[in-house]
Image (tube, rainbow, N blue to C red):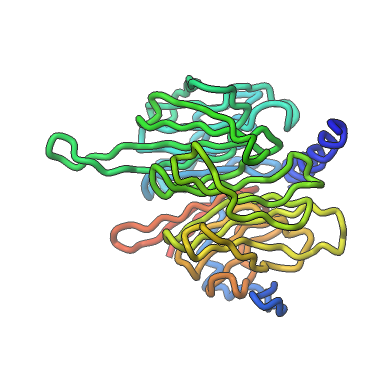
Amino acid sequence: MKKKIKTACAAVASALLFLQAAVAQNFNGQTANVTALPNKVEAGWKKLTTDPYPGKQDDICFVNEKQGWYVNGYGKIYHTNDGGATWEKQLEQKGSFFRCIAFTDSLTGFAGTVGTDYFPNVTDTIPLYKTTDGGKSWKPVSYKGPYVKGLCAIDIVREQYINHGNIDYKYHIYAVGRVGSPANMMVSHDGGNTWESWSMNKDCTMLFDIKMFNTKEGIACAASDENIAQSNALILMTKDGGKTWEKVFQSTRPYETTWKVSFPTRQVGYVTIQSYNPDPAATQQRIAKTTDGGKTWTEINLVEDAQAREFGIGFLTPEHGYVGTMNSGYVTYDGGASWQKTNLGRACNKIRLYTLPSGKIYGYAIGVDVMYYGE
């Protein structure tokens, strides 16, 4: 049995390593028209100049229009002060595979690693690093609880409170992982000064992303089995800050996992579903959608293309959103009823979209390339 599980997990790792080395239907099941977008829409995303990387890079984050960071599997962390026009390499740590990154402000940030025994040449066993100087230096994070082998996503909840007569903020940080198992969670309720970890193996075997609506309620993207041949896509919901989880969605097909989540509003959310089915007839790509805050989910179709394995997802509104796949990007303007191809680069893994108080929208996406979105 262990041999079968390792073989199945190796199949997933091999598919992801392919990217490292090389890098539609509507609700009623009727074929949708998937075509290239007009140039005026294509111009919304543009490729930024960055160091070349032979595959999928995993995460990017910004604290304002100008200042941001991204990470990749070569143990590198990059920083920009000019909105991505230029990038400075802040760290190169051989043996580390950085998978996720998040900052609470311009100085304090966290970078998670995928851990060992999954990708080759990865030796770093530390799951999480912290910086307090804007990324100039990074130190391992200490935590109480079971060992966390690797992380795939970090989410931050900013809680408003009154501090000596002034409005201030507390930062609650949630991290989950990993692809290939095991499933663990790390949480800090004091801005990352102290951390606690716990296992989620009783609820799932892999964890890919997390979205916390507040300090109690949230959604996690997961998989039901570490043997990909037996795995279903799985979405979990918590109402107690991650201590316990309820299964709110599970696909019925084997060879599936979830991947990334986007909630443009508290009620409407989307999750990408990945298929590793080797059957050449299994061409339909799907997304899960909720309109009741994550309590129930419905599958909607993206495109019939076996090569369009899904990765990142990001929605500006309940109707307008983007999905990154292995070979292209897709955009919808009607909540997923129809999709059109758009240029997000290959293997777009994370899409970050931001709205300023003025109403201006900007965003970044990362995969093989780093992309910028501006209206």
360 shown above or below 87: below
**Quarter of the view holding residue 136:** top left
265 shown above or below 13: below
Residue in the picture at 36% in, 47% down: 64
Residue in the picture at 78% in, 38% down: 9
Residue 3 percent across, percent down from the top left: 87, 32
**Quarter of the view holding residue 248:** bottom right
Q: 148 or 55: which is nearer to us?
A: 148
Residue 154 percent across, percent down from the top left: 50, 39
Q: List the single residue furthest toward the left.
A: 165
Residue 321 percent across, percent down from the top left: 53, 64
Residue in the picture at 82% in, 36% down: 5
User: Which image quarter holds the C terminus?
Assistant: bottom left
Q: Is residue 24 left or right of residue 362?
A: right
Q: Is residue 44 left or right of residue 358?
A: right
Q: 52 or 211: which is nearer to us?
A: 211
Is residue 166 visible in the rendered image? The answer is yes
364 shown above or below 283: above
Is residue 49 visible in the rendered image? The answer is no
User: Which image quarter holds the N terminus?
Assistant: top right
Q: State how many labels appear.
A: 0
208 shown above or below 314: above
